[in-house]
Every structure is written in structure tokens, then in C-alpha cells.
Image (cartoon, rainbow, N blue to C red):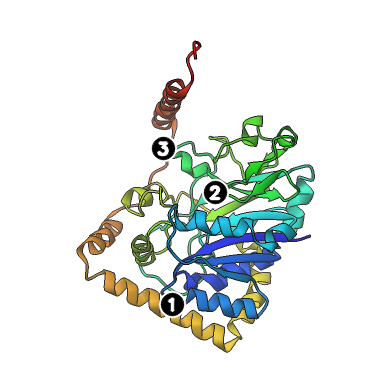
Amino acid sequence: MRFLAILAVKDEGSFLLDWLAHHRAAGISDVLAISNDCSDGTDAMLDRLEALGWLVHQRNPAPHPKGAQWSALKLAERHPLLAAADWVITLDIDEYLNIHVGDHRLPALLAACPDAHALALSWRMFGNCGVMGYCDRPVSEQFLRAAPAEMIWPWRAQMLKTLWRNDGHWAKPGVHRPRAPDPARQNEQIWRDGSGRQLPDAYRSGRLFAPLGQRNWDLAQINHYALGAMQAYVVKAARGRANRDASAFDMSYWVERNFCEEEDRSVLALADVVAPLRAELAADPELAARHAQAVEWRRERFATLMLQEPYRALFGRLLLAPPSRPLAGEAAAVMLGWAQRAAQVERETIAPSPTD
């Protein structure tokens, strides 16, 4: 069975080898890596990885009128790797698939949900927890504290990434869920969450987050290392978002993701399988040299940014800010209530009147 991960990257070569080793260990058989105008040598690393048989690389040069991410997905939907895949998931470099059942690989997850057409896997946000300096070490080993299992605000804490069966129910990959469902088969779709529960029919046509206020990852989750070290975050902020319509990487993004409430080492269950794969990558002289170049680029880029007041100010605020406190009880209910009320007003505003 072929499992395809679609990965769009820009200036993330220093994280690439760790991400690849982990996902090969987790059962991803194919990676379509799409690079967007890189300055750190990520594109050259991907060329070498393609030559070594680890992935397929496609360049996605600017301009990107609707954002680099959507442009990359357009390339992916026409690629032969998509047509050949049995299952597909779109992941970012800071997202790690983390399977809790069996041998922690994809076949074990599918065996737990054999009837599913789509598995909606929730993010678990891993906070920065005071780590200032960037270092060349896997994020899965550095950042071990995360958001609590049952959190209803911010709602992004339950956003999902979908592992979907490529059997004709959908025609196109999306950022969080597959797109272009077959209208004749839409009512057949079975969606399950990361705990194996069947999700409501609304997930067949929409929804980007799992049901709020419950544990959604007994079988699997997506570890989301959105922040990383403070120095790495400043570099990320300067790079900008891949989605044209998304908000910037700033203090609001940081505060909504810097949760350090619970320790979670579960992703390290694959460590003994990941280690030899990572060593195999490091053993290639050209790849090792290009990885070292990307690491040095990241350090030099941070030093350059610190000479500019906006980024120096951002770094100072990161140093000042404590980990975020998850909202619970009345405060969480108030925020959720206002969000639901706003959604209702929006629906009523756009709904046609009875006389239309």
C-alpha cells in the first residue's frame, strides 16, 4: 500500500532530514516535496534526496497569485504520485504524524479504522516552553510539552489534518482536508477522528477542526511544532506565511500556540526506527554538507534580522512572554459562545430570504 505525503517547503532545509526520517519510519512510502524559491539550499537538498530515492522534488517558482501553498497543491493534484497513492496526507515541516496504536505505523492505524475513507487527525500544539536558541536537533526531541487533551479555546487547538483514501471520493488534495468530492458518492464518506469515533455528516462537506472539548487522539495525532526555538521563530516570521490570506507570524500567533501544560513523549516511540534512517541520510557526504549549510544559513539569517528593529522587538517580546494559560471553565465557555454567536449571525446574513 502506498502512502503519500505532500510537503511544501521554503528555507527549511535544517529541519528536512529529521522530518523525512520520522515519516519514513511511520510508514510514509512516498513524499512529493514542492519547494518555493529557497535561499538556504533546501531545493538542492531535495534534488539530492530525489537522486537517493527518498522523495520526488518539484520546484514551484513565483509568482504565486493565491499563495505558494495553493500553487503547490495545484502542482500536486496533477502529479503521477497522487494518482498512484492509496492514501494521501498534506503535511508541513513542523507537523509530525504520531500514531499510538500497534507498531506506531500507518498500517496499524488503518487496521483500527478499516471502514474509514478519511481520518481527521487533530493537532496537538507543542509549546516553546522557554527555549531561546536554535540548535540542530530534532524538534520531536527538544519540545516535549504540549496543550492539554481537552481544550475548547482557541479553537485552532483542534484543527485537523486529514489522511484520506484516494479511491475517487475526492479529486484534489487540500491543506487540511481533501477537496472536490464526488457528488454522487459524498453521502458514502465515513469520517473518523483520531480516537476512531465516527464524525457527523457535516464533515463530508466541510469542517477544519475536530469536535471541541474532548480527547481526539487515542489512536493518532499530529504533533504541531509551530513555534520551535525563539530564534527559529524570528526567522520563520521573516519568511512569512505560505497562504496569502493567512495572518502573519507574530505575537498573536505565538500566544495562541505556546501551551506547555502536559508532557507528551509519545512520538519518541519510533526513535529506534528513526535513528538508523537518519544516520543513513547523514552518511551521504553531499547531503550532510547541504544540511550543514542550511543550519548555518538559519543562524546567519537570525543574526541579520537582529539588526532590524521590528525583528529585534519581536525577539524581545518572545523573551518576555510566559507560556500561555489554557482557558477553562467560564472563560472558555464565554469565548466559545461569542464565536458561535458570530457564526450564527454570519449564516443569517448570507442566507437567502424566503421571498428570493
Rendering quarter of residue 276? bottom right
Q: Dot 3 surroundings within 10 Å: few (below 14), some, or many (20 or more)?
A: some
Q: Are marks 3 and 1 in contact (CB under 8 Å)?
A: no
Looking at the rendered structure, the secondary structure element under dot 1 is: helix
Front position in the image: 19 or 174: 174
Q: In percent of the image, x 43 and y 54: which residue is there?
A: 65
Q: Percent from the top left, x then y, of residue 166?
A: 72, 51
Q: Which residue is mark 2?
A: 123
Mark number for residue 327?
3
**What kind of element bears circle 2?**
strand
Q: Which residue is mark 1?
A: 295
Looking at the image, which residue sits at the far front? 356
**Lower position in the chain sequence, tag 1 or tag 2:** 2
**Which x, y percent locates residue 317?**
26, 56
Per the model, the C-alpha gap separating discs 1 and 2 is: 27 Å
The three-letter amino acid code for the residue at tag 3 is: Leu
Q: Is residue 307 left or right of residue 321?
A: left
